[in-house]
Amino acid sequence: MIHKTEILLITLLVFLLISASTIKAVPNPEPSETPQISFEDFMQATEVRIKVEDQSSNVISNDAGDTLYFFCPTGTVSMGTFGGTDVWGWVDPDGKEYGIMGVSGGIAFIDIDASSHIQTIPFTPGCGWRDIKTYQHYAYAVSECGGLNDGIIVMDMQYLPDSVKLINTFPIDGGSYPASHNLSIDTIKGYLYAEGFGTGASIFVHSLANPEAPSIVSAFGPEQVHDMYAMNDTVYVAQGGMGKFSIWDLSNKFSAQLLTTFPGAPSGYAHNIWPTADGQYVGTTEETGGKTVKFWDRSDLSNMQLVGEYIGPNYLAHNVQIFDRKAYISHYESGIAVVDLKDPANPVELAIYDNYPNDDGQNYNGCWGVFEALPSRRILASNRNGTLWIFKEKTGVINDTITFADAFGEAGTKIRVQVNVTNGIDLKILVIPFSWAGPLNLIFDSATTTGTRAEFFEELKYTAKDDNNFRRALQMSSVVQGVSPLLPPGSGPVANLWFTIPFGAVGGPNPIVITSFNNKFLKFDQGCYQYVPEYNNGLVTLSCCQGQTGNMDGDILDEVTINDLTALVSYMFKSGPAAICPAEANIDGSPDGEVNIVDLTKFVSYFFKNGAPPAGCSK
């Protein structure tokens, strides 16, 4: 305990010392290590929704909780021949997926994992149209031509990926007629339906009880047929030039019952028809310039109601298929369109991918057919130039954030600002435009990924620089020539931004801010879809207590001299001003930060008794 007598003696000694001319200087201490900012700290920062204006159309601003749809090309396979037509898919018992595509020379089989062409079963050369469906491990195809391997062609796929075996061909009508524009297979009931194309009947029904030898059962149909869809004894028919569609009950194969006919294309061409899985709605196309893809409510078969419509940029749709309440549309020169049908009265375009960039007109180029029903959610799209496109389909909920963590540093030292990211979706590219303008006049040094969860990123570059206005746009990429992994979902630092605080820096906190400039916007890139996450700005704060305590008079050189002792005595006993940096007065380093006689005693001991130096600064 310090007694009153000791206090008086110390005070007297201090006043004698004030007039002394000798000054003891304390050298600048070594800079302390930049403190680490925890993930919990940055997550407590205030979130500010980014507002992006005049951004490119493929960057979409999303709110937290939004579900995004990703539609990404993963490969193409060229069959080396013009005349790409229909496409279908098949999954073997081991889960391996294949594409099957009609080309000018026949039916091509594709390993979509390897994006490689396996084999083509030949048809009549030069004949363009092919239509393909599968049942068990067999593929069935028809063509409009008469000649080599035409009719209903049966192919055995059980030997894939090595080869496909041609089993046989069978007449469409059970007699000798080979040509057919379209077929559909009721995989639940095991029947194949083939369009008659020039025969006396419209649709021929074949049993697949023996899959290698389809046997004709019956024939039925309206005046004209162009396309059809059969499932669970219900057959949906597009009646071509008749301008109407019909729905049939084939429970009795020998007595087809017409359920309804509706004039879905009175001034167009009734081209194709496809129902939702529950049969409540159907989609139709007309393959006529300016005619929309239409969605119908079939709950009342006596009064089919048009509830929604869609058309892509080129105003010429070819075919529609519907899976999981999404319509997949082969849209010729506009490519492939995916439309959300959760509310069929309000179809919403989820994505459109143009696989024919040469033009966007009402011509019969580009995307001919689409197939979606693969377990991997990959989508196959055939192009008229004989190329198969492979896409991946994925959805994800956006709760992504990017945060600049607060940092503390001393004048004349280098500091690190961590860039922390929470992402729920794999990321390929991050574009981070930022500004460091503020009172501390920070100097930007570099960006690194060392020690972060994005350390494997090969590419860090600045896509825009404006150092005169304290701005840069950092782009980080995990993929070089498509060989590297994406940044997996997770949370934590992905980059370090390094700044230097100049000597003599004074002032309040210096913000580190997400800021768009020179057409560079904050975005996360999944590889086929770009979006804007939530973001949090950070602050660089100058730590006024630098190195160690004791600089009571705020000397810019951080020297601890007799002037500082004088300032402390004046503050404690003569109502003098507090320290410019109050933390400098806590010389004994007490956790409560209180300035009292203990601090003065320690200071005097340091100056006149070779005592321990003042305590180090605490952040």
Image (cartoon, rainbow, N blue to C red):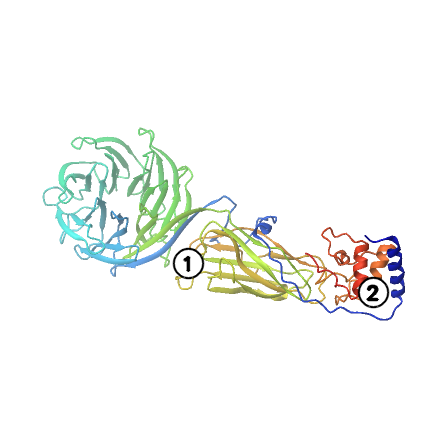
Q: Residues within 10 Å of mark 1 (few under 14, many from 20)?
A: some
Q: Amino acid at mark 1?
A: Pro
Front-most of residues 22 and 382: 22
Is there any visible trace of residue 291 in the rendered image?
A: no
Which structural element holds mark 1? loop
> In the image, which is nearer the foreground, mark 2 or mark 1?
2
Query: Residue 27 placed where, x, y %?
Result: 73, 69
Q: Which mark is residue 469?
A: none
Instruction: Examine the image and state in which quarter residue 35 appears.
Output: bottom right
Relative placement, left or right, of 412 versus 253 is: right
| Residue at position x 67%, y 64% in the image | 441
Measured Cα–Cα span from mark 2 to mark 1 = 60 Å
**Disc on the earlier residue, 2 or 1:** 1
The residue identified by callout 2 is 563
Query: Residue 500 placed where, x, y %?
Result: 64, 65
Q: Amino acid at mark 2?
A: Asn
The residue identified by callout 1 is 485
Relative placement, left or right, of 239 versus 422 is: left
Front-most of residues 224 and 412: 412
Query: Residue 325 placed where, x, y %?
Result: 37, 40
Is there any visible trace of residue 471 in the rendered image?
A: yes
Front-most of residues 12 and 531: 12
Q: Quadrant of the C terminus?
A: bottom right
Which structural element holds mark 2? helix
